Image: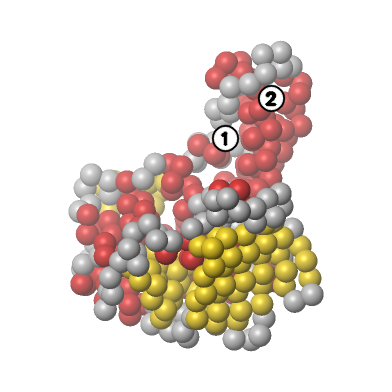
Amino acid sequence: MLERVKLTNFRSHEGYYLDCKPSTTLILGENGCGKTSVLEAIYIALQGKSFRAVDREIVKRETEFYRVEVEFDSGEKTVVTYDGNKRQFFVGDKKAARLPKKYKHPVVLFLPSDLNLVEASPTRKRDFFDRLGAQLNSSYSNSLSRYDKALKQRNELLKRPDMDEGALFSWNLLMAKYGVEIRQERTKMIAELNRRLTEAYRSIAENSDTVRMIYDSYTGETSESEYLRLLSLDYERDHLTGHTNFGVHKDDFEFVFNEVGAEGNASRGEMRSIMLALKFIESDLLNEVFSERPLVLLDDVFSELDDTRQKALTMNFERNQVILTSVKAPF
């Protein structure tokens, strides 16, 4: 269990202290007062990175550093510091540039924007499922990180007018290797979510509707060698546009409701029930992988749900430690 959170120069907070309850901790405040920043700080300390910004954007204005300290009921403590140049993690007597895997704690993060995921852009959907996949499988997180680095380097080279195609080869190799790994992991993850999705949805909606997802991979079932060939084939177009046009960074996910596309057919309430179902499944999967119930961070989502869905959310997470933000008391 998380017991205490202390922030220094974190976004709008010069100093902030939070005592956490074993069940539910409520952070009340008007919009813009920094409630989400508290959840962001907790997420960094438990997962090793922010869900919305880079470090230089987090430091309070006119200051040069930030510090996050979280303490657990076990006595374990994690401290995160950023000095304007680099971020460091201190756990016990250990110091690291990245949060070691064994000190990460499972987290279910529920943002208001998640409720609109069914109709969201492909980028937003990829971010959502990649955040889940990275928690469930550290090798998936590694593949994403290395693919993103290769993609960034390749795109920077493509913007050079005098760039030679041969300079792309090593980055093409990395993109092909990790792109195939990412596609395979996404395929497995969506298959597992689909195995549970309709049942979870029906537990909320109490009807016989069906829900599933389609993973629309931009690269299809290409092998590494075929992936590499297609990247090379796209060289002229890529150089002209200044970015990479082929790859898993273009993947999309479609929601299917009663065997038709959910977007444009499912009601607003039905789409929100789909998202609740996904969050419940996420919690179950993390519990199975880590053998501990994840910490649940709810960022002002109660105000977006009707009474029935509020009740479903409360009942499903009644055995989890929950930290939620709200403009007004939801209960």
Q: How many marks?
A: 2
**Label 1 element class:** loop
**Label 2 element class:** helix
Which residue lies at the image location 72% right of the left edge and 72% below the top edge? Answer: 91
Q: Which residue is mark 1?
A: 247
Observer able to see residue 136: no
The N terminus - image quarter: bottom right
Residue 102: % across, % down: 70, 71
Observer able to see residue 208: yes
Q: Quadrant of residue 318?
A: bottom left
Q: Quadrant of residue 176?
A: top right
Instruction: Kindly give the residue lying farthest to the top in the view shown.
Output: 162
Q: Which residue is mark 2?
A: 157
Instruction: Name the amino acid type tagged 1.
Output: Gly
Crowdedness near tag 1: few (<14), some (14–19) or many (≥20) residues, C-alpha within 10 Å: many
Relative horizontal placement of residue 57, taking residue 102 as reference (left or right)? left
Q: Nearer the viewer, residue 252 or 100?
A: 100
Which residue lies at the image location 65% right of the left edge and 56% below the top edge? Answer: 65
Which residue lies at the image location 52% right of the left edge and 70% below the top edge? Answer: 16
Q: Nearer the viewer, residue 149 or 140?
A: 149
Residue 103: % across, % down: 68, 71
Residue 33: % across, % down: 39, 61
Question: Is residue 214 placed above or below 20 in the rendered structure?
Answer: above
In front of the other: label 2 or label 1? Answer: 2
Instruction: Kindly give the residue lying farthest to the front in the view shown.
Output: 62
Question: Is residue 2 placed above or below 177 in the rendered structure?
Answer: below
